[in-house]
Image (spheres, coloured by chain):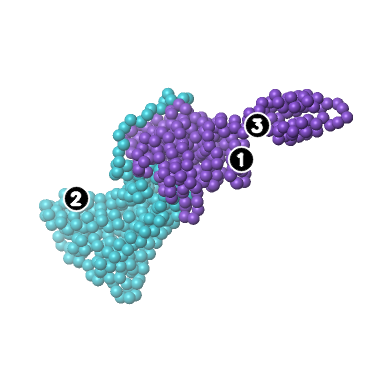
Chain colours: A purple, B cyan
Amino acid sequence: MSVQLENVTIRYGEHLAVDDLTVTFHQGSIGLLGRNGAGKSSVLKALLGLVRPASGKIRFSGLPPDASAAAVRAHVGYMPERDAHLPQATGFEMVSLLGMLSGLPRRDAWRRAHEVLYLVGLEEQRYRPVSGYSAGMRQKAKLASALVHDPSVLFLDEPTNGLDPGGRSEMLELVRQMSQELGKSVVFSTHILQDVEAVCDSAVVLERGKVVAQGNIQELTSGGERELRLRINPVPGPSDSAARVLEALQASWRADALGDGRFAVWLPEDQCTSSVFAAVRKTSATVRSMQLKRRSLEDVFLTAVRGSGGSS
Amino acid sequence: MSLAHHYRPLECERVSGFQRIWPLARQEMTALFRTKWGVALYFVCLLPSLARLVLLLIMLGAVDLGSRSVAGRMPQAMDDMNPHRAAFYFEGSLSTMPGMIFFLLLTSVVVSRCVARDRATNALELYWTRGISPWGYVFGKWLGGFLLTASMTVGMPFLLWITGCLLAEDWSLMTDTFGQFAIGLFGIALMTAVWTAIGTLISAIAPNANLAMVAWSMLLVGSSAAGFVISQSLDESSLRSCLSFWDAGRVVVRSLADLPQRDVSLPGALLMLGSLFGGLLLFARRRMRVVEALQ
């Protein structure tokens, strides 16, 4: 199932949270990135029908355009960012009750609650009160609650919040499997870019309620300039070889001297490293080592945010 | 572990409407019995009815204390204590002491905390992202609280009456009291519904569960106290039912059951209950807006 937002604007009184947003969440796992207050949670709440957009349209493929919020929620699973649990309830009671509220008959809700709690790894703790769970277990209980009614789209709001490294990698693995093995569309809202790189196929970067970058993660990280780190062997002689090399590099590219014979060169996407080799060789210096740094999602994010006028 | 091997797509018909709300009501109704303190509290709240049951057994001669059929020789002024009168069975639920005190004890723990407690644990975000509306959620919470409270205010009088009918020497107790008792019981059920609705709305407005409990207790006891003091000082007894929503409810039930009352104002009582409920509903509408609850 894909979800399409067309010119969606969300306001909270005077505050403009999302400004004329047009974006499509295709099947697969999509990272919804942005700083705090960028509008990520507002987008999720609008998708769930909790917040009514001031203007624009939200369409779920396979559902009529005028589908009610309840009809939408039957196909959507939501994992809230904040710690949330039902007072006094055990893991099993919480998940089965939320299943029943989603329209599952009692018998199916019970069976399903056992299944999803097993899937997320809470089978041993399902009869313990959720209030006594650790942070990681609570996150898993929320994920089980989001899965209980077998939704085709999952909105996960900061699912790795407050998790230790072990719990975080478990959660990311679950998200990856849900998208790749179960074929669910996962919208993964976070500001932890490494998490998105680890599990998502594509990303949408929001800044001040607008999309400032979007696309396949591989395409996003391979586009633009790449940073090349090189180190040269100093050449004995009257003039400073490092200065000559820097001068030669700066003639063709953006380059910086890092000291001790090391340089950083920013290569455009369409140029290869051999041209840097050739330029260095012309100065009689020899290259000792060279490392091409892959552009990270963080670089993409920072570039997009700076480009939109925001500070990093 | 691979999810693909263990995950089974769900194949079932979805239920709608009340069938979605009922699990919430059932959970609310049974929540008190999850702890031994809750069970103890519930049985403490049944004590007045149990005391009345003992009285009934003595009055009808089931327990022989040497005063068989005391009921037949009671003066009319003691109608409330006569098992051959309908008022005997439900008057206990309407009295200030013990009725209101035990009602307060139960509802301050169950009804007044229901929504506020969910707000404190962010459970509202979990509930409202399901297939029920915020008002469906409030209805479910109210229904659970109402059914639990009604088991005390309506269920126990009904059990007493059935016991009285079975213990009486003939069926005259049943035939004589049925009409008035049924209307009185309906009145109590109605008032329990209104009182618990007021408690639920206070819970929906309050920022946290403890504050909701305090506000509910103060409203119930405070309005009764204010009604008593002001009506005494102004020497205007009818004011009491216009200021206290407990007394207002009692006036409505007694009027429905056609029980004798002096110096009361039925329109004033109805106005009091209506305006309190309406006012709280308006406040709760603002408070239960999804956007505000999720911020």
* Residue B40 on image: x %, y %: 36, 48
Please identify the quarter of the rendering in which residue A247 is found: top right
Label 2: few (<14), some (14–19) or many (≥20) C-alpha neighbours in 10 Å: few
Q: Amino acid at mark 2?
A: Ile
Residue at coordinates 87% horizontally, 27% vertically from top-left? A237
Q: Is residue A257 visible?
A: yes
Instruction: For marks 1 and 2, give the CA distance.
Output: 76 Å
Residue type, numbered disc 3: Pro
User: Given the image, on which type of amino acid does mark 1 rest?
Assistant: Leu
**What's the distance in space between the residues labelled 3 and 2, CA to CA?**
91 Å
x 50%, y 47%: residue: A19
Q: Determine the chain carrying the residue at label 2.
A: B
Q: Earlier in the sequence, mark 3 or mark 1?
A: 3
Which mark identifies residue B162? Answer: 2
- Of badges 3 and 2, the one in the foreground is 3
Q: Quadrant of residue B87?
A: bottom left
Instruction: Determine the secondary structure under disc 2.
Output: helix
Coordinates of residue A301 in the picture (x, y in percent)? 59, 39
Q: Residues within 10 Å of mark 3 (few under 14, many from 20)?
A: some
In the displayed structure, B165 sits above or below A275; it is below
Give the structural element (helix, strand or loop) at label 1.
Answer: helix
Please state if A181 lies on the left or on the right of B65 as rendered: right
Task: Determine which residue is flagged by label 1.
Answer: A302
Q: Label 3: chain?
A: A
Q: Residue A143 appears in which quarter of the rendering?
A: top left
User: Of tags 3 and 1, which is closer to the observer?
Assistant: 3
Disc 1 sits on a residue from what chain?
A
Which numbered circle lies on residue A268?
A: 3
Residue B141 image label: none
